[in-house]
């Protein structure tokens, strides 16, 4: 954790609006009903939205993801019994709003995201980003790497996202991690895809991916090995490296996350995903994103609720980072 | 209009976020992407949400109405070509957030709404309220009447809402205007229901209602007479009295407003409603509400979009009030 | 009206459950929360469901129509202000449940419907039938004609339903009125389609239809002539003949009735349909049906609500029949 | 089991309508198409609806739960192969309709539920109640405890529901079991929450809850231990105490039960819930409820279908009660 | 009509699949179940899809428009009674499939659309294009103008689409007609927006638009003047100029077309739109598009059905072109 | 595998449209964007739709299943990493369109399906059929048995489908396998239901079923035993017999497959189903169907996506058949 140790355990953090005084359905939907960044002195963790989806190859709509996840996050309460922590208490978490991106120009949008991320990092915050499509992981990684050097990466996704180009385009939601690899942003000794499934373009996809250093934990592995064994392997691989977590909500089965753009049957349950995240307590999470929530395809906010719980685990991991 | 005349035409009003710089789908969903009340010195018009629906007799859910209408209002632009006015320019309009109400105690909620309204009135603002169910019209009327004395009332609704009690309860979404009448809040020379339709409990409903001074413009009248003739009659009746507009979104046909609690076939089109509101330019609107948007029953935000356009007409009428 | 005149104005009719004592959303969903047929001595009007949809050529699902319309009818109140009548007061209306039909054998189902209708007619009731697809109009007409002789017919529909066969099948939802014509069930001096629109198979469709004696009021006529003029023409044509009203809910525009099987753009508003029905006060309605509500395609019950209001107009026309 | 032993195995029970004669989609939707209470002499089990949702803190709509669950129960067949029992055969199960509650006054509603329950108990029936929100568990417990004394409780829920107050209100859907504890309705030696997950307000929530005697089986435990081990533990704890089962459908993951008011990711599958219930065969179930089905948020009746299967397991447990 | 006069009345045109032999829901969904272009010798009218939506400023999803409109077009029958024509009989209409466009590069996509259109024009076909977002109108106009010189334009839309840039981008769905004006593609003596409504950015929007020569028929005009009067004015303005029709489905009210990206309340009914199109019989339609159908926001295909009926009117106008 | 061994590994197979050139959302929706049968010389596997649902006892709509599954199959890519095979490469897979069936006459439809299947078999193809309701399995089995003699059957379903009649009808979606047994189409030494759950009509259902030779793997068995153990048992039972796989999508839990007609809680996850299918590699699959996808009840295509993945596993099994 980069903030001074004395920050941990701080008791002056401004927490969520009190749900016994203001109903959860009232008031503005900042993440978890936390204060805005401009309402606190400094934020240890900034939750920021990136409403960008011009990089998608199938169903668009993730531009509405940040709003949907924030709305669903109205239900989050401040104490995490599974990890025995109050993540909004030991660190100041605040909502930094959205980074405005040009929806008509991918390159310009990537630059804006990188700049927005740099600015928040510069103010001393870790970032928990809500997408948007997976294209945004590249500028987010560039920015976090400027702070921490190359990062270990846990990439939760139905897909590899290490393809090279679509229609000649290098910067899309299917290519961020190949670009990140090429740019030297990744600590190639600790890269894993988690939850991968579904057909690929060809056998070479796997070879290319392995060549960059990625290991793969498939969705089927969750059924065959269980979460605990998988988590052990991942934790060993990660060690105390600075870790970036990038979570495409399509890692969940469409039953759990219909509101996404490229659904694949046979995915994780939300319980498996939450359990695996929880078991990463003690790793040094330096940044994280939750992407690809496309609300037009969601039902009864179930995808957004799952994403908000994922975000809650992530912010809890950040709180626990330097205590693991 | 209660604010000093020199306020009209002011050029220092803070307007909406620029959609050519920040996409409409980005950033917090204040009404029309306008500033919050705490971001401006004074507001001429305060848009305030009242997420309360414990007064409904059939489908609940209007507690989520303020959020839905604000989200839909992202699409509003600043110039009204039909009335040739920029309503956010000639007056400062700002978003006052939500009034928190106890969902378990109708009386307590009514008191909170009344107090919240008084506070905003005290700061010099007219109120444009987004419900919530129609119960809220009573405390809103009490508060506005304290400023202006008994008001003329245009009540747009499929129903009369002048019933006496349900299950012995006096304060529900079907009774606000009977209570308002009993409390002397209404200028009985200028009361009209607009858009009424559907079956009643009995013939005495009509007699009771007429006894309070209400005239009725039915939904069928719109088909038979047209908007212009109806508007003429209403304007004559209202004159320059202080006017309160209470708009139950169920005045629209369920085709136009499925997202509401007590739908009745045979209603107005959104075009008729907008046209009628527009034709009230020059009346002295001292307050207004749009209620009964129940998002769980909406589709593709069509009800919320209609309600946001209704709110836009209302704020435009307020802007034009002292110029008519 | 076939029941003795002294029945009109009866004060012993059992009405709907009192909504001020039992919430509208509570209790079994008989039509308009009226008693079941077995709870009253005799019924003047029996509301009966026919959950049959094996005759449809496109989207199925009307088998769930009776349930959906009954659920939506929870909102109906007992007094009709437009016609100044309490239709459940001057006549005993009761819910006769559903006629069970074989979903796998159209001929057998038709026979069951005919028998069920005969039984209710035998008990002295007029029938207001809720479908089910339009195939059911044929057995219903056979049964009512046994009581009254050939009937005048007002057929509200986007389509003509006088086609001959599909796939060689003679009894489908697109053919009932040709069969009825061939069987001599129709008074060919007073037959009208109302609301027709959309493309046909060929010009001969119109010639065939005219050859059976049908007049056509198109949906476009409603825009060009208005309801009053159309109603005048229809009333003149019908006179005091025994009249059967068959209302395919797809006569409404898909905006007003998405929940149906063969939608056509450019249809009636629910207000136009209700107004036209209302203007038939004084005709001698001997039976009626509302068909083709397919709830799986409905949204927020808007189609079912419209159908329930249509049914309410029909039962009101029956109440007014001998007073017109 | 309170009914005489000779009642078990009775062959005179009136069962469901025969689906080979009357299609499942036809006829009134009593629970499982069973007779109404007034159609049988006495009922061993009364299935009763409580359409009340004024106690909810987030999404309302459970007032429509009883109707939705009954509609979904049309698919239930009479023989349970997993438990080798025909639950409608060995005991008379009948539908007791709904208890009408005042939607505007929680206290009055609670009194009505208690009275309605007492009346059915007085007629010799066990109650299987379909909610409605969880507030209703309190009056149901009061009534059943008058028959049986303090009961063991298995509470299936994502939440603890042992909070104290919201907005000062003591009787809400988040507080029934604290009230029940305070009123001495619970056998504190055999209380368990099952399926709990998601964040809490604070660590003290757990301490308070434990202080009342509750044990907790989390949703994560299902993944780590499996159903069989959990069931063993629960059965040991319950023994032959009179047992009340209260099942909030939100114990299921939102993927399985989107139609509810306070969804939490990471929940049970419907298979886990059904399996656990089934494994309780032999316990002495003296009453049960299934609550918090909010149909406006459901899709394709999946939540209602799950709830109807839960109800089927419950009625089967009741049938097996005195044979375990 | 550009094809030789002797083609009109041709009897060798290959028509739709026979719905009495192959159910409408079976087989591939070419437009109106017509042959593919490769199945006929030459096509007089090519129906072509352009699944592109990277130019949208709010809700995306129109990339799925062509598929949705084709699916809805399964219901179209071959004879148009309103215009007394069989549009698939007097001219060969065929489905040309989709033009593949790069979703990540607007400029490249525009070039591909222009090339694809040129190719079909080169083969002698008029184009009826199904979008896709409104960006595509520009390359379509470029291509048709190469055939016919500058064209008269009827632009049906809630919006003007003559804005200059968004985020500096010149080629988006809000700017095609300004670009077309600048490129000299439009016959400035005959340009009209039809159905415009909703707020604008400023008064200068109107001035800019008028400066390009556009007249405006607002949605309110339809209520005040009626379709016939509007059509007279438009026909006079158009005369016998080559006419391009560009129809943004959001010209319809959201009640009629929820499935679109930038909905505005107060729009046209589908009946008004169809009637107006029909009244253009005799104009020389040289090309047309229907754009902005975004199926993820549609319900029960109502938007797609409306769009398919619009397309049917357009193809009928093309058939009647040289006979007017 | 019936085609000559040299066909395996063929490199001249025409594969799917290249998604890097033509976006997945563009172009006609043949299965997996593969060529049509008429575009290839011979097909080793023909994917054929049977849009028939007149045999259903509850929710209809599977007539739209083939279209929905094909649309969802746009997302399938050509390499199967789990089985290390490119199923469209080693064998020619092509889309054979739909078999047109009379929706009004079950017997006629069955005959048409049988004839259509015979024709495709005659051309040398194995069939992968997309339903349609389960009635279609009977004619498909008749046809495949003419090629291979009585077949082993793996029947994935929530239900047994070995009932005798409904309403006297022998050919429905609940009876195909009893008929198949009676006709001697089944190799009674290797028959299994997989995924069965939910209540039955009576204990005799099980006895009847066992009497035909069926074994049952319940859905609960998946939780208790796991996929691997179940697969072992099934593979032993099947051996190298010619195997027909009939997969009712309702074998999945409603959470994974809401879009079906007779949902039962407690079902398989899509991951379990895909894993079990995958573990059948090496069996001799001579034909397969995926049935009962009813799109009107689906959400965000999740059921259709699952069905498309099931189909992908099936075609992969066919590719591996003679190599196992």
Image (cartoon, coloured by chain):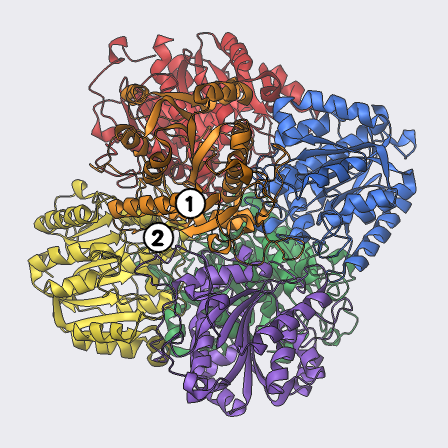
Chain colours: A blue, B green, C yellow, D red, E purple, F orange
Neighbor class of circle 2 (other Cα within 10 Å; few <14, some 14-19, many 20+) is many
For this rendering, which residue is in front, D170 or E243?
Answer: E243
Q: Quadrant of residue E317?
A: bottom left
Q: Is residue C192 above or below residue C53?
A: below
Residue C16 is at least partly visible in this image:
no
Same chain letter for marks 1 and 2: yes
How far from the left and from the top, in percent, is residue C154? 21, 67
- Residue A314 sits in quarter: top right
Task: Determine whether, in the image, residue B146 is placed left or right of residue A95.
Answer: left
Give the labeled residue for mark 1: F294
Q: Earlier in the sequence, mark 1 or mark 2?
A: 2
Q: Nearer the viewer, residue A157 or C73?
A: A157
Marks 1/2: CA distance? 18 Å
Tell which tag, 1 or 2, sits nearer the viewer.
Answer: 2
**In the rendered view of the protein, which quadrant contains the C terminus of chain A?**
top right
Q: Report which quarter residue F320 is drawn in.
A: top right
Q: Position of residue A233 (x, y in %)?
A: 76, 23
Label ID, residue F100: 2
Q: Are the residues flagged by discs 1 and 2 in contact, CB closer than 8 Å?
A: no
Against B279, residue B208 (above or below) is above
Which image quarter holds the N terminus of chain A? top right
- In the rendered structure, the answer to whether residue A242 lies left or right of residue F4 reads right
Q: Secondary structure at mark 2?
A: loop
């Amino acid at each position: 954790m980069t903030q001074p140790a004395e920050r941990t355990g701080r008791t002056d953090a401004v927490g969520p609006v009190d749900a016994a005084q203001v109903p959860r359905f009232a008031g503005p939907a900042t993440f978890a009903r936390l204060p805005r960044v401009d309402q606190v002195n400094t934020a240890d963790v900034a939750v920021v939205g990136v409403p960008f989806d011009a990089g998608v190859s199938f169903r668009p709509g993730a531009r509405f993801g940040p709003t949907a996840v924030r709305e669903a996050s109205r239900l989050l309460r401040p104490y995490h019994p599974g990890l025995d922590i109050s993540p909004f208490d030991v660190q100041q978490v605040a909502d930094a709003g959205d980074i405005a991106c040009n929806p008509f120009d991918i390159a310009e949008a990537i630059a804006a995201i990188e700049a927005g991320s740099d600015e928040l990092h510069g103010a001393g915050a870790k970032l928990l980003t809500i997408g948007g499509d997976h294209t945004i992981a590249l500028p987010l990684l560039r920015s976090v790497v400027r702070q921490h050097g190359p990062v270990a990466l846990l990439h939760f996704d139905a897909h590899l996202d290490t393809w090279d180009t679509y229609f000649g385009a290098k910067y899309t939601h299917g290519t961020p991690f190949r670009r990140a690899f090429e740019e030297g942003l990744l600590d190639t000794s600790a890269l894993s895809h988690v939850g991968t499934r579904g057909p690929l373009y060809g056998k070479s996809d796997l070879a290319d991916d392995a060549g960059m250093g990625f290991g793969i934990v498939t969705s089927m592995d969750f059924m065959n090995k269980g979460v605990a064994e998988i988590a052990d392997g991942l934790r060993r691989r990660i060690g105390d490296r600075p870790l970036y977590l990038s979570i495409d909500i399509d890692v969940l089965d469409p039953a759990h996350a219909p509101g996404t753009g490229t659904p694949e049957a046979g995915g994780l349950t939300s319980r498996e995903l939450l359990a695996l995240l929880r078991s990463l307590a003690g790793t040094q999470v330096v940044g994280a994103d939750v992407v690809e929530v496309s609300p037009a395809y969601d039902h009864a906010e179930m995808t957004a609720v799952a994403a908000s719980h994922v975000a809650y685990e992530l912010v809890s991991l950040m709180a626990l980072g330097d205590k693991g």
